[in-house]
Image (cartoon, helix red, strand yellow):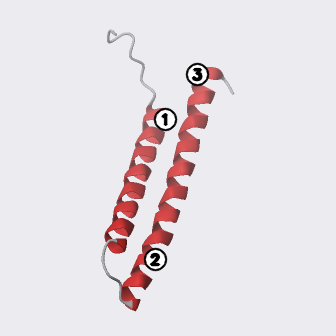
Amino acid sequence: MTMSDVQDYPELDTLQTAYKAALEQWISAIRTEEALVCVNHTLAEVDRWEQAHFDEEDARERAKEAKQDYENALREKFFDF
């Protein structure tokens, strides 16, 4: 691939970066939940664990939305739909 083969798509770069960031946030939320589930729980810790689960679900939804935005932009840019 030569430099002339590489095209600049700043809008796609932005969407890809947003998707990657959303994935990293989701991974972090999963690791937080995992850390809380791997220890003995007091009632307060169970509450923190449950909240971590809700946070993970929210992060997953944001990642799915960012992925959809990026996929839609790719389809529009390269396939005109």
- Which quadrant holds the N terminus? top left
Query: Which residue was labeled with disc 1?
Result: 11
Secondary structure at badge 2 equals: helix
The mark nearer the N terminus, 2 or 3, is: 2
Is the residue under label 3 in contact with that under label 2 (CB below 8 Å)?
no
- Mark 2 vs mark 1: give the one in front: 2
Secondary structure at badge 1 equals: helix
Secondary structure at badge 3 equals: helix
- Amino acid on which the number 2 mark rests in the picture: Gln
Query: Which residue was labeled with disc 2?
Result: 51
Residue 78 — which label?
A: 3
Q: Is residue 32 above or below residue 72?
A: below
- Amino acid on which the number 1 mark rests in the picture: Glu
The mark nearer the N terminus, 3 or 1, is: 1
- Mark 2 vs mark 3: give the one in front: 2
- Separation of marks 3 and 1 at Cα, in angstroms: 13 Å
Q: Is residue 1 above or below residue 79?
A: above
